Amino acid sequence: MMSAAAVRVSHPTGKLSGTAILPASKSEANRALIIRALTGEDFLIHNLSDANDTQLLNRILSTPAGEEVSAEDAGTVMRFLTAYYAATGQKLVLTGTPRMCQRPIGVLVDALRTLGADIEYLGEEGYPPMRMKGFSGTGTNQLSVRSDISSQYISALLMIGPLLPQGLELTLEGKISSAPYIRMTLAQMAHFGVQAKFEGNHISVPAQKYQAKEFTVESDWSAASYWYSMTALAQEADVFLPALRFNSLQGDSVLPELMVPFGVKTEFTENGVRLTKQPKEEKPERIDFSDCPDLAQTVAALAAGIKVEVEMTGLESLRIKETDRIAALQNEVQKFGAALTEVEPDVFKLILEKQPENEARVHTYEDHRMAMAFAPLALKLPLVVEEPKVVRKSYPRYWEELQKAGFEVEEVQ
């Protein structure tokens, strides 16, 4: 199936039940891998994600770096490795796919240069590829960084903070994007013995050493969002998702509350969560995705599928993801009878316009979340999803799990 140009997806009964296996969180896994490398000692990371991004990072960090390293299409890998190679003084070229070389990294590189890194752009200023030329450690430890673009820049800097001669004093400028991911980073650093203070818009990380310690990765709440969407779209649903925690570090763990207006009930158990349908007692109004931008595509597709109008804000970072996710959503929701319109600055409203097509064909823009966010709409009408292999980036067994849940998934050209 992974070699097919497209898959036709449908569900003959509209009823869901059983257990769906989620991938492990690549956000947690990728941070643990970088910290293990910075620790300089080996330790076990349990439930390491099988997502391509995580496996790629693990391979890169587990083998001696050559003259050139490719982060492929993985934004987190590119950003974390940029800081890692800078702080450890490694000399090499860091590059990625053509799309990756169109994604900005200037905010992070400027910050690393201030700290003492020698980094040279080999193409357009502010974008990969880059030549990492060493680290002097003679720069200041005082940084002010824009925080309204991507929290991954902040996390990359925080993880190298303890290794800097004077530690790191970081001031965040502007609205903080994806703050839960910053807190996740600090919590994982604390697990490995590094203490930091996060007060207001300032984070202080004293110079100190990481301590090698085993770590267990939680299942991925971002991946869980697609099963929440399926539960809302199904005629009947009773789905169990193992290995999700109530006290999660992941920003997308807001799903239980966020999905109430869409008719999904969450019950936490000792081993995970149970999802069932419940009457929709309220309508979703304006949802702020500043802390959980990876849920925006799921919600937009779901709202189009169940014919609910909703306002969405906090989408600034979606422009610089695997694709321009706002433009991609605007194109694809039209096929389901909806329009996503900017009604005021950074406020987008999903508006219902017409009846959906009898069978929609979803273009995925080489973006794993476009494929997985729209596939659940097969509970409402048959659809074709192009480039099904893109799911390997974060949820390699996605199509197999859909088939276990009663979906028919057929290869087409």
Image (cartoon, grey):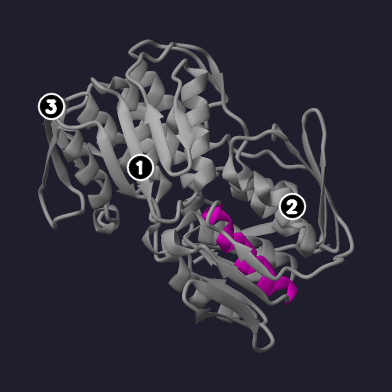
| Residue 300 lies in the magenta-colored region | yes
Which quadrant of the view contains residue 244?
top right
Numbered mark located on residue 138 in the image:
3
Residue 402 percent location from the top left of the image: 68, 51
Structural distance between the alpha carbons of marks 1 and 2 = 31 Å
- Residue displayed at 46% across by 76% down: 345
Q: Quadrant of residue 169?
A: top left
Kindly report the secondary structure that dominates the magenta region of the rendered protein: helix
**Residue named by callout 1:** 171
Residue 26 visible in image: no
Query: Which mark, by number, is residue 270?
Result: none
User: What segment carries the magenta color?
Assistant: 292-307
Q: Taking 348 as reference, is 65 above or below it?
A: above
Q: Label 2 belongs to which residue?
A: 257
Crowding at mark 1 (Cα within 10 Å: few <14, some 14-19, many 20+) = many
x, y percent for residue 290: 52, 56
- Disc 3 vs disc 2: which is toward the camera? 3
Q: CA distance from mark 3 to mark 2?
A: 47 Å
- In the displayed structure, 289 sits above or below 326; it is above
Label 2 Cα neighbours within 10 Å, binned few <14 / some 14-19 / many ≥20: few
Q: Where is residue 328 drawn, in percent x and y?
A: 46, 70
Count of numbered marks: 3
SS at badge 2: helix
Q: Are marks 3 and 2 in contact (CB under 8 Å)?
A: no
In the image, residue 112 above or below residue 281: above
Residue found 41% across the figure and 39% down from its top: 202
Q: How busy is the neighbourhood of tag 3: few (under 14 within 10 Å), some, or many (20 plus)?
A: few
Q: Amino acid at mark 1?
A: Thr
**Residue type marked 3:** Thr
Q: Give the structural element (helix, strand or loop) at label 3.
A: loop
Tags 1 and 3 touching, CB below 8 Å = no
